[in-house]
Structures are given as structure tokens and as C-alpha cells.
Amino acid sequence: MTAPWVTLTAFDTLPAAEIAYGRLRVEGIACALADRSLLQLGIVADGIELQVPAAQLEQARAVLTQDYSGELEFEP
């Protein structure tokens, strides 16, 4: 039997959902995007859900709360 998946968060835009998805994948967390919208029609109805296995929910939350902006180096 497969462990249940839960919704970690929902996004209004696809780029934001894909960034979060990528961050989780890099950390080795299984995840999936569940499109609850009608993006092909240009309509975001219920958003795009980012889902993870229930057993990895807290780990996924921790990953998405990390802020790496202070580690960025800007060159003029």
C-alpha cells in the first residue's frame, strides 16, 4: 500500500509552483504538482497544488521556509 500524499501548499502561478517543486526535488523530497486550474485556457481557478508524501510533509515545509537570498552575490 502506498503512503498518502498531502497538499503542502497551493500557488496561483505555474512559475512559482515549479520553483518550489524544483527546490524539493533537489533536496530529495518526492513531490508532484496537481493542476486544479484551467491554465490551458488562461484561468487559474483553484490553483496549482504542490503535494508531498505525508511522511515528508515537515521536511518539505522546512525546505521551503529556507531563505537563500543572503547567499547571493551580485556583480555590477
Image: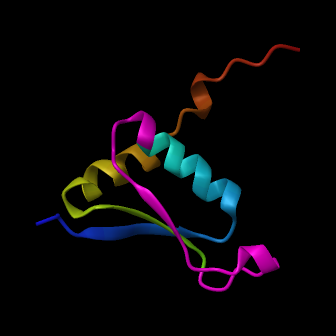
Which residue lies most toward the bottom here?
45
Residue 66 visible? The answer is: no
Percent of width and height locating residue 44:
70, 79
Q: Position of residue 39 (x, y in %)?
A: 73, 74
Q: Decide: is 22 above or below 39.
A: above
Give the side of residue 14 with respect to residue 49, left or right. right
The relative height of residue 69 versus residue 63 in the rendered view (above or below) is above
- The one of 8 and 2 positioned closer to us in this rendering: 2
Q: State yes or no: residue 30 in magenta.
A: yes
Q: Residue at x 45, y 49 (%)?
A: 64
Q: Residue at x 58, y 23 (%)?
A: 71
Q: Which residues are magenta?
A: 25-46
Relative placement, left or right, of 63 versus 16 is left
Colour scheme: rainbow
Look at the picture and state if 73 lies above or below 64: above
Residue at horizontal 60%, vertical 47%?
19
In front of the other: 9 or 72: 9
Residue occupying the far left of the picture:
1
Which corner quadrant holds the C terminus?
A: top right
